[in-house]
Image: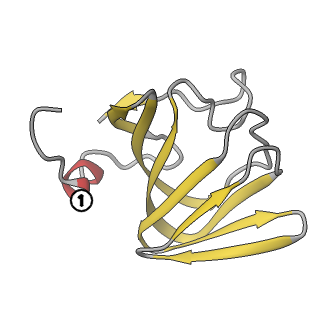
Amino acid sequence: MSKAINLAEKLETFKEHWSPRTLSEFNGHDIMVVKVEGEFNWHVHEETDDFFLVLRGELDIEMRDETVTLRAGEVYVVPRGIEHRTVAKQEAHLLLIEPSGTPNTGDVSTAAKRMLA
């Protein structure tokens, strides 16, 4: 990374929901931004935790036994092996950090293709 990355500017470069954009890599992890709205599918990551930081809006992270609601500036990590889905009643902007190559659905065959921002 040769210069600072402005997250708001990167988020303005696309409109698609549920399509993460990779900004940089950090110790084998992708740092991504994504716009979300509506419900994502239930899924599980058997090999890695799932990190969410809400930049704008509000996000519900539903697990089978509880729901965690995040607002702008709040972080939550879903532990590996926990089935979950994310729900945004209105558009929300997120920062995600995942090991490079981790499928966002936990399954390569159903994962959204990652793009560079």
User: Which residue sits furthest right?
Assistant: 65
- Where 84 sits versus 61, above or below? above
Residue sitting at x 79%, y 42%: 44
The colouring scheme, among rainbow, by chain, secondary structure or one colour, is secondary structure
Query: Disc 1 designates what residue?
Result: 8
x, y (%) of residue 29?
A: 46, 33
Are there few (<14), some (14-19), or many (20+) residues within 10 Å of tag 1?
A: few
Against 75, is 69 above or below?
Answer: below
- 42 above or below 107? below
Asked if residue 3 lies left or right of residue 29, the reply is left
Q: Residue at x 25, y 54 (%)?
A: 7
Q: Position of residue 14 (x, y in %)?
A: 32, 45
The N terminus is located in which quarter? Answer: top left
Q: Which amino acid does label 1 sit on?
A: Ala
| Quarter where residue 115 is shown | top left
- Residue under the image location 75 percent in, 48 percent down: 41
Q: Nearer the viewer, residue 90 or 71?
A: 71
Farthest residue toward the left?
Answer: 3
Q: Where is residue 60 in the image (x, y as percent from the top left)?
A: 65, 71
Q: Where is residue 99 in the image (x, y as percent from the top left)?
A: 54, 32
As helix, strand or loop, the secondary structure at mark 1 comes to: helix
Q: In terms of depth relative to the viewer, which is nearer, 61 or 87?
A: 61
- Number of callouts: 1
Question: Could you tell me which quadrant the C terminus lies in?
Answer: top left
